[in-house]
Amino acid sequence: MEFLISNDSLFPSTSAVPVSMGLDVKEKNLLKFLGTTFLPPVIIFPYLSRTFFPSNNLGFLGFLTLTYLLYISIFQHVLYFLKTRILFKTDLKKYGEWAVVTGGTSGIGMEFVHTFGRKGINVIVVSRSVEKMEKLKEDFESKYSVKCKYVQYDFNNTDATVLSSFKKSFNDVVKSCSSVGILINNVGLSNETPEYLHLIPESDINQMLTVNNFGTILMSRLLLPHFVERKKGALVTVSSASCTHATPLLSCYSATKGFGNQLTRSMFYEYKEFGVDCLSITPYYFVSNMFKRSRSTYLAPFPSSIVEPCLLALGHVPECYPYWGHYMMGTIAWFYWKTEEGLLGIMKKNKARAEAKMKKK
């Protein structure tokens, strides 16, 4: 889950040596929440069932039910780990020599760019700030023995003339490259703070719908014909865990992320016959422009903890939580029937804190 409207301002390099992780206040509160709401019924129910209904083995039935649910969760996790880490290794260069990254001048987009550089893959960055892309290009090519090109475009601008000009410029750049094989649909934005839908400025709503939805469709349609013609390619959409369950006060943002998630996981099956691997990733919090932190934590890691396992999952699953901590959170949210009510309380507190900070400025 991310917060902040800008996806383009430079963020300190995530490739630096990571700071040691530890539990912060949010994580301690999560543990308290689980300890007081989730675990007691799980532990007590089988015992009470056996105590009060010894003759019909409800206690044993409860134990079997719980064991079965845990088995499903653990089995899925182990299977995912085996497929993406041990049994099958994804060779990114099999897709092509170039990768396209939208919103690549900051946060997780920049981490994708540098990851490709370390793996010897050239990149094409699409973003709105020429100055930032110039700086990224200079930094990228000085560090790695590969090339970086860029195309300027503001995904919020759907003027017919501007859009036509961008499509031509982008297609010309793609044609000038030997083989473009990977697309990272990363560009996106959210409401600045958790907010009720009717109180979000109309301009912000329009931007979220345009950038998050239209931007994903636009880039996918530009590159999919190229992938299909070559009979190979990879498309990754950076969605959000906020779309995997109801997320109050992030209703519009999570809905737009749900659009990208549903689109991409459907394309996983739609384009498999053409040799194109599609993957939607649904991370929770991570250090970025939308969630600014001076250090990583167990539940809010640096983008590198998301990018590497994400690329390993390509071709094996249609969607995933790449980071293990987010996988655990998503599993808990799936099992627990009051997740949305708990999130509403958390979001209200986040909203109050953000408004208090804004008043102090």
Image (tube, helix red, strand yellow):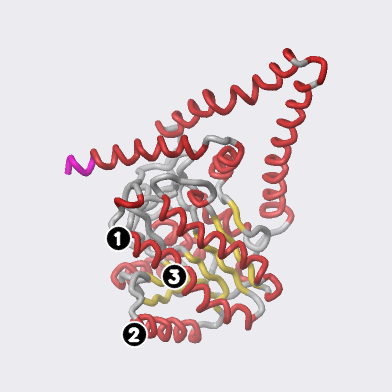
- Disc 2 marks a residue whose amino acid type is Thr
Give the residue displayed 52% in from the left and 23% down from the top.
Answer: 36
Marks 3 & 1, CB-CB < 8 Å contact: no
Mark 1 crowd level (few <14, some 14–19, many ≥20, 10 Å Cα): few
Q: CA distance from mark 1 to mark 2?
A: 24 Å
The image shows residue 237, relative to residue 339, as above or below, that is below
For this orientation, the residue located farthest to the right is 55
Q: Nearer the viewer, residue 212 or 326?
A: 212
Circle on res. 202: 1
Give the residue displayed 30% in from the left and 60% down from the top.
Answer: 202
Give the residue displayed 69% in from the left and 16% down from the top.
Answer: 48
- Disc 1 marks a residue whose amino acid type is Glu
Q: Position of residue 111 (x, y in %)?
A: 45, 58
Query: Which sits earlier in the primary sequence, circle 3 or circle 1?
Result: 1
In this image, 71 relative to 170: left or right?
Answer: right
- Disc 3 marks a residue whose amino acid type is Phe
Give the residue displayed 78% in from the left and 23% down from the top.
Answer: 60
- The segment highlighted magenta reads 357-361
Q: Which residue is mark 2?
A: 161
